[in-house]
Image (tube, rainbow, N blue to C red):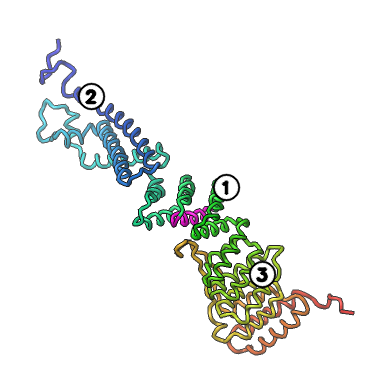
Amino acid sequence: MAPAEPSGLPPGYGPRARGIPVRNKLLVAAVIANLAGMIAAVYVARLIRDVPAEASTETALLVVYYTALCVVAVADALLIDEFMFGGAFRLTHLQGKDPKFARASDDAAMVAATMQRSSVSFPIVLLLSGGLTYLLFNFVNQDFNSYYRRVGIHVSSLRGDDPENQPRRLQAIAELSVRRHPTIVPTLRQQLARGGEVGAWAAWALGRFTDVTAERKAILADLRAAVRSPDPNLRREALISLARYQDRDVADQLFGELERDLAAGVIDRRLLVAAGYIQVPKVLPVLQQILQRGDEKAQRVAAWAIAQHRDQREAKDLDTMLTDRLPSAAFSVRCAIVFSLGILGNERANVPLMHAYDTATPEERTTTCPVEVVYLRPDGQQDHFELLLPVDNYENHIFKVLGQIRATSPEIRAEVEPWLERLVAQHKGDGTLKADRAQSLLDGIRSARDDSKVAAPE
């Protein structure tokens, strides 16, 4: 019979054998921790996605979720430390083993493990385990961590109706409007149904999802219902958003809103941008009235909106609408009209453009035409729409447009060419580029058509 171990234990249960049960226990504990943690994480993540009624409940659920993640990471780290480093961290930091006090009877592997730098190896293992656990939880929960950080935290901010948290709800809608996730559009549609200021902001936000084709029908149906709302703010935001989808069925409502603004003397320039989006000739008469009687900024956007109708077969004499206003308009409005005439490209505009150049002061000719910025968000911030680009001075704008709508018919050339010749003679050698620009334009006009091939009148 084999002699007993020094410890008094039977053969095979000495110090070397004691590590085997510990490893088994750690393995079982790690498996249980992973399964329990995974189940808890999936359940808790589902509850958080459903948006608990109270913020405190959501906070508690987040604590449970990340606590489960940490427990699993620690269990896995201890198991890895046991198999890779002989349980160095457990022995030195949990059981208090110190190689300085090792006995001759102690297991050599255990003593070697206590001599390793577990204060360095274990934190590294713990971080790696935590990262892997994070990725695993994220995979099982369909990218929950990223969802909550980018979307879920803003969805949670929408809960409640208390007035003091209204700014937070509106900011949450603004944040969701620039993100793309399958849950965002349904959430915004729910906010639209709430009505009031939240509903108006949700209507605006849905107008920024023109690229989400899968939800298009549902969005349009909800916005069309909102256009019939008795709430004027909600109705207006829904109308502007429908225009961003180029829903031409809203032309009647848009015409009515523009007329009301014109009568009130305060034009919402977002409605003018909406008119440019849908391009329905029915709104042209009110756009022309705004170009004549609106405030200066509204006139500039109205000029741009009129030019956007250039491809509509029913739209007639768009250039005349603009050129009739050109002589008496303020400088910034003249800039917008010149720009818009370049969009239309009708050569009849040559003569009015020449007159606009001649009647401008030297200071105006060298003044840079400003960009017009329209903010589409309900509070007039962000979601900006820039019009009348690129930037240039008034004189250059006129020459560019004259080059775009180059005169071709003999009757118009008969006025344009002498005018250009006078400019060349007037500015030749004065150190400016005016003579060169005029000469270049004149040469282009003359080279584009040979009048000798035109039949002489009988």
User: Horizontally, is 381 left or right of 247 in the view?
Assistant: left
Name the residue at the front extreme: 230
> Above or below — where is 120 with respect to 200?
above
Which residue, given by chain and number where applicable, does mark 1 sit on?
217
Which residue, given by chain and number where applicable, does mark 3 sit on?
344
Q: Position of residue 318 (x, y in %)?
A: 67, 70
Q: Residues within 10 Å of mark 2 (few under 14, many from 20)?
A: few
* Residue at 47% over, 57% down: 200
> What amino acid type should be assigned to the residue bearing mark 3?
Leu
> What amino acid type should be assigned to the residue bearing mark 2?
Ile
User: Horizontally, is 230 left or right of 317 in the view?
Assistant: left
Q: Earlier in the sequence, mark 2 or mark 1?
A: 2
Q: Looking at the magenta stretch, what is its main secondary structure?
A: helix
> What amino acid type should be assigned to the residue bearing mark 1?
Lys
Please say whether residue 195 is visible from this viewpoint. yes
**Which image quadrant: the C terminus?**
bottom right
Q: Residues within 10 Å of mark 1 (few under 14, many from 20)?
A: few
Which residue, given by chain and number where applicable, does mark 2 sit on?
20
Name the residue at the right extreme: 458
Q: Find the magenta span and give its range.
A: 196-209
Q: CA distance from mark 1 to mark 3?
A: 33 Å
Q: Position of residue 244 (x, y in %)?
A: 56, 58
Foreground residue among 194 and 112: 194
Q: Position of residue 131 (x, y in %)?
A: 33, 41
Foreground residue among 221 and 72: 221
